[in-house]
Amino acid sequence: MRNVFYLLILSAILLVFPFSAICQWSSDPYENTIVAYQAYEPQMVSDGSGGAIIVWWSSSDYGLHAQRLDKYGYARWGNNGVFVGGIGWYQGENFGLCEDGNGGCVVSFADVYGLYPPYYFSRLYAQRIDSMGIKLWGNDGVQVCGLDSSYVSESRVAMDELGGFFVIWDDIRHGTESVWLYGQHLNGDGGSSWVPNGITISGETNYDELYPAIVSGGPGYALAFWHEVSSYLWGQRMDRDANISWGEDGLLISETMRFSNMFRSDDRGGTILSSMAQHGVLYSIHSQNIDSLANPLWSGYGVVVVDSLAGGLWSTTLNDSGVYYIWGTGQVGSLRIFMQRIDLSGNILWQPNGLQLTTTPSCNPAMIASGPNDVLCSWLDYSDLHILIAQKFDSEANRLWQHDIQYSFNTDRYGNLNIITDQMGGAILCWTIYPEVLYAQQVSANGSLGEVLSVENGPADISPMKFSLLRNYPNPFNESTIIPVVMSPLASNKLPTILIYNVLGQEVNQLAIQLPRAGINYLHWNGQNRNGITVASGIYFVQIKSRGNGECIPIMKLR
């Protein structure tokens, strides 16, 4: 009787939350995983278990949504993700995102309330979401800045590496004359460590502090950067006790690093800064390593990575073999991709102005460190069809895959590409296309689409149970469906019992894994009962049992 009641409760849940497409990594570049519709400005971080957490702004409700894709590409936070929070009618798309160090994430965002402009204001909120999609800081998040006179535009957030988080944001509190930069420290449960509404990071009254960025400065520290109207780059160092180290209003870092900045922690308390400078109609890329006291470690004004390019997007990453840069340059219609490597002493290691990677029209490059001595790169090839390409390079710029990997043909008005490591030598990428469809794809260390190489350190979802059911596909189904079962290495020599029940709690069929192995095992159900008779349309439940542990998922059959 208890089983029947449990199954009926699950049936009611299914009626409230109807079925929709469930994510899983695809091996077909024409059929990438769709994460969301009406999605803008996505950001992505690792879930710490080989998967990804993606946050985006939705035009459907003017709010922020988050979704976790596990290492197998399955959506773990419901069909539509998690609404991040806020109480106003609009949550700004210029939000901050970082990992929380425990499989979840922290989001900082402006929450707009009041009437339409120019009569509205915004407060700053933050939300922490755990690996299961549970909002830890209340349904709306915690209020970081609640002054009614404030107007928050952009915010950024970073871990303090001791269980807390730094948040910075630009803010108008003194009329519309100037934008100042403020900061706050949050502990692990969302409580503010500093004075209410934060401390002033920079408040130079003659200038606006714009485009904030923040990186870790080592345990208990953070480095904040911003531009003033003059486009000069400024910075500030702070600790979790609200002490600032680089002057009352920050420190002028560079007069040449004007815009399009990127920052990478150097794991020594400092950071590697990279930026573009404009020279008439052309541009150059400069880079500098500063320590925790803001001393430049590379000679002069830093390293000129490339002294003449025609603009466009670019990217940088860092690993044990140095700092890598990738960019596109050339005339419209004939752009090519180039790459350069600098060692950690600031020496250029390849030929001046980089090595050319592509011979066909290519643009929009991105990269991520995929190992201590290699990087995984992506770009858009627009020579014929518009195709997203991935390739892996070693520290001498040798291609590690025999062929460039075509990972997506879904590229109509493509933009907002994010790339992170899958922690197994591959990468997870997400991007948007017109009309604002958010896609994701995993590319393995071997250059295969949707290939998960190991579950040795797999998601916490399958421990200590050792077995886990993933969503079947297709679902709903007509004739047959595939049911993925994840098995840890320790469980691959133990056969679980896998049963199918109807909504009355009656056993319909029993399935068996013929050759169990660590990783994903795929079970096929032909929609028939034990007697080989096709079952009726309706909701059924797949249950896995092993040594007293159990897990159950609902599935739906349609005729």
Image (cartoon, rainbow, N blue to C red):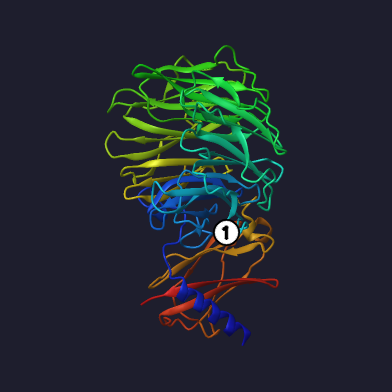
Farthest residue, direction front: 175
Instruction: Give the residue at x 68% y 45%.
Output: 164
Task: Return the residue nearer the eye: 96 or 252.
Answer: 252
Going by the numbered disc 1, the residue's amino acid type is Gly
Is 31 on the left or on the right of 506, as rendered? left
Task: Return the residue nearer the eye: 479 or 301.
Answer: 301
Q: Is residue 290 above or below residue 458?
A: above
Q: Which residue is denoted by mark 1 in the rendering?
A: 133
Instruction: Using the rendered image of the protein, determine whether residue 226 is visible from the camera's viewpoint.
Output: yes
Mark 1 element type: loop
Label 1 neighbour load within 10 Å: few <14, some 14-19, many 20+: many
Quarter of the rendering occupied by the C terminus: bottom left
Task: Return the residue nearer the eye: 214 or 146.
Answer: 146
Instruction: Using the rendered image of the protein, determine whether residue 445 is visible from the camera's viewpoint.
Output: no
- Residue 488, horizontal then vertical, whole percent: 64, 57
- Residue 314, horizontal then vertical, whole percent: 44, 29
Q: Is residue 462 above or below residue 259?
A: below
Q: Is residue 120 above or below residue 399?
A: below
